[in-house]
Image (spheres, rainbow, N blue to C red):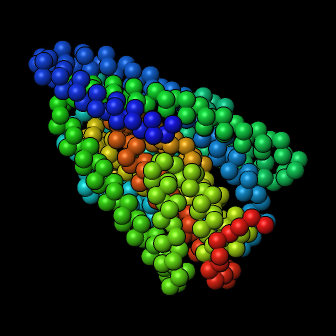
């Protein structure tokens, strides 16, 4: 089904380019071209409203469930502390790299899009004090109703910690949160069925007004992003080599198959069983691999995090919006939390990007610009997630002194 979905996305992209180019050529009047583009954009607007509809409940259920399943931090122990410290470092590096590459290469510069009927767009002028004050909700329900994602995050963390502290007494609540998260992720899957149609409408509308020159922007976007991924891979592999030692090369060779699987399916969760088998074959004890890897799929999505900062800044550049360094730092803090818990669902990270755009008053319509080529970037970020989690498991095992010599392939016992 995923292959068919990819074909539909590509078909929507190609058809959008063709229709947009034809409209741009045969409708020379700019006013008439904008009117046609506005009609096409209705389809994209519906898709974006559906995405926005899911943001708050999806972030709440997945984040609260993830925190609840971590258990009491006092009982997580030494392995948990080392794992979370590694995840924190990897997350920060990934987010900063996305910010640096988007800021230095400016893949969205030169397009100069505007939102019809709007004055010059300015990002939310948010100071650190404003950020802290705004992050604390006076009502969890109101925060969700208003799509105040920062406040939803705070509320979800408190709920998750409370559920974890109550242990067995809140087991039913933990299950409800987990199942609620699964329901919301399934809804994301349903909404994404409309993505090929939204891709067609978005590309056709943009090319109708801008012409085929938009292709240069897409090429710059994909090229810049993969350049950032290459640097992130190098950092992750070097960090693993420093901690694991000379044997790290063996682990990297064994990871080729799960990495290719994640790349081809555009979901790192598809490679989970194979990655776990590779880690145990490499010598990572099952107790560590079975702890670090699932936790990493919620809290260590390196590829998704570099994409989040990259995509947000790209869209800001498209609309000629400048985010100050302070605002970008705040964006990193927001994404450190909101990017958790969305592994395994292709393109669910778009929800996180949409939430961040909303937080900084950047036009959410910009999200439609990346839909047509998001699949190609999703392949890279999914493969990166697998590498990041596998290296983390190997590093934690080495720090714990539990890394065994290479074992024979794991068999059922």
Please say if 42 is above or below 247.
above
Please say if 216 is above or below 257.
above
* Residue at figure coordinates x 25%, y 16% from the top left: 36
Can I make out residue 130 in this image?
Answer: no
* Residue at figure coordinates x 78%, y 67% from the top left: 413
> Residue 237: percent from the left, percent from the top?
45, 72
* Residue at figure coordinates x 51%, y 36% from the top left: 1
> Residue 166: percent from the left, percent from the top?
84, 51
Judging depth in this view, the residue of 290 and 316 nearest the camera is 290
Numbered circles on residues, count: 0
> Residue 328: percent from the left, percent from the top?
40, 52
Can I make out residue 215 in this image?
Answer: yes
> Residue 169: percent from the left, percent from the top?
88, 47
Residue that extends furthest to the right in the rendered view of this protein: 169
Judging depth in this view, the residue of 144 and 353 nearest the camera is 353
Judging depth in this view, the residue of 361 and 409 nearest the camera is 409
Left or right of 162? Residue 329 is: left
Left or right of 39? Residue 72 is: right
Picture quadrant of residue 19: top left
Left or right of 312? Residue 359 is: right
* Residue at figure coordinates x 55%, y 43% from the top left: 345
């Amino acid at each position: 089904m995923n292959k068919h979905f990819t074909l539909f996305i590509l078909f929507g992209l190609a058809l959008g380019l063709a229709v947009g180019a034809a409209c741009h050529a045969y409708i020379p009047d700019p006013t008439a071209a904008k009117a046609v583009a506005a009609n096409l954009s209705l389809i994209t607007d519906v898709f974006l409203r559906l995405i926005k509809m899911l943001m708050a409940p999806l972030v709440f259920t997945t984040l609260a469930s993830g925190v609840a399943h971590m258990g009491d931090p006092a009982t997580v122990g030494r392995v948990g502390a080392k794992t979370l410290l590694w995840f924190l470092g990897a997350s920060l590096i990934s987010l900063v790299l996305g910010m640096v590459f988007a800021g230095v290469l400016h893949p969205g510069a030169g397009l100069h899009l505007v939102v019809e009927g709007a004055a010059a767009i300015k990002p939310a002028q948010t100071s650190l004090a404003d950020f802290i004050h705004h992050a604390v909700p006076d009502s969890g329900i109101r925060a969700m109703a208003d799509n105040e994602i920062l406040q939803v995050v705070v509320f979800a963390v408190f709920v998750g910690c409370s559920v974890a502290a109550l242990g067995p007494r809140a087991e039913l609540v933990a299950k409800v949160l987990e199942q609620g998260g699964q329901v919301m992720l399934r809804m994301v899957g349903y909404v994404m069925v409309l993505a090929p149609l939204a891709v067609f409408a978005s590309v056709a509308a943009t090319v109708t007004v801008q012409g085929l020159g938009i292709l240069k922007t897409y090429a710059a976007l994909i090229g810049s992003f993969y350049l950032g991924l290459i640097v992130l891979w190098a950092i992750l592999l070097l960090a693993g080599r420093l901690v694991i030692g000379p044997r790290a090369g063996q682990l990297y060779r064994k990871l080729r198959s799960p990495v290719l699987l994640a790349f081809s399916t555009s979901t790192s969760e598809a490679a989970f069983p194979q990655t776990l088998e590779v880690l145990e074959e490499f010598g990572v004890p099952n107790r560590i691999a079975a702890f670090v890897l699932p936790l990493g799929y919620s809290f260590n999505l390196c590829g998704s995090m570099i994409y989040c900062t990259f995509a947000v800044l790209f869209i800001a550049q498209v609309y000629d919006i400048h985010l100050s360094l302070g605002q970008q730092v705040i964006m990193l803090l927001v994404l450190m939390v909101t990017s958790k818990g969305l592994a395994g669902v292709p393109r669910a990270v778009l929800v996180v990007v949409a939430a961040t755009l909303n937080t900084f008053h950047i036009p959410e319509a910009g999200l439609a610009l990346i839909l047509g080529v998001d699949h190609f970037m999703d392949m890279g970020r999914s493969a990166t997630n697998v590498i990041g989690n596998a290296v983390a498991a190997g590093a934690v095992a080495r720090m714990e002194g539990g890394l065994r010599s290479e074992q024979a392939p794991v068999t059922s016992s």
